[in-house]
Amino acid sequence: MKASEVPVPCACTTVRRGARVLARAYDASLARSGMNVTQLAVMRAILRHPNEPLTRTANDLAMDRSSLYRALASLQRKKWVRLKDAGDARSHSASVTEAGHVVLTKADAAWARTQTGIVNCFGYPRWKAFVLELQRLIECANTVAANQSVVEAKL
């Protein structure tokens, strides 16, 4: 395929640029709570998967395990989460501590204000449609990656 036939702009670069801008907006609003949006997302995922292996939490967040463990390290240092050995060295779970629940409560109000402001500015119907389109983009990326893996395995 010729470079001139490749659609632009790059899907990955475009989505990452938007993600960085959004993360800065959320991080700014969460600053008074002492956490950032990644920490908030990780702690909420832990709450959704109590006593489940961290692999499940990583999958929920679409994070690789090493990135999740780096995020968890800062949460542990702040005593917001506790890691538990789930029986073998490869299987851990996490729980949110009492201090973690306190900071989550503080962060939730700031997150809600930012979330509501962004969605209201964007328009709720457009937001709902965008979420569906973004899910479709994720599915396409997974399909293309799986197909490329099959082709590479045959080479």
Image: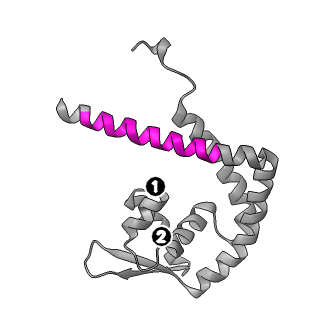
Magenta segment, which residues? Answer: 130-150
Give the amino acid at mark 1: Ala
Disc count in the image?
Answer: 2
Disc assigned to residue 62:
1
Instruction: Give the residue drawn at x 57%, y 26%.
Output: 9
Q: Position of residue 113 (x, y in %)?
A: 79, 63
- Which residue is farthest bottom? 98
- Among numbered discs 2 and 1, the one appearing first in the sequence: 1
Q: Quadrant of residue 44?
A: bottom right
Mark 1 lies on a secondary structure that is: loop
Left or right relative to 142: residue 34: right
Mark 2 lies on a secondary structure that is: helix
User: Where's the C terminus, which quadrant?
Assistant: top left
Instruction: Give the residue drawn at x 62%, y 47%.
Output: 131
Q: Is residue 91 above or below residue 38?
A: below
Give the amino acid at mark 2: Leu
**132 is within the stretch colored magenta:** yes
Q: Position of residue 42 (x, y in %)?
A: 53, 67
Disc assigned to residue 72:
2
Q: Nearer the viewer, mark 2 or mark 1?
A: 1
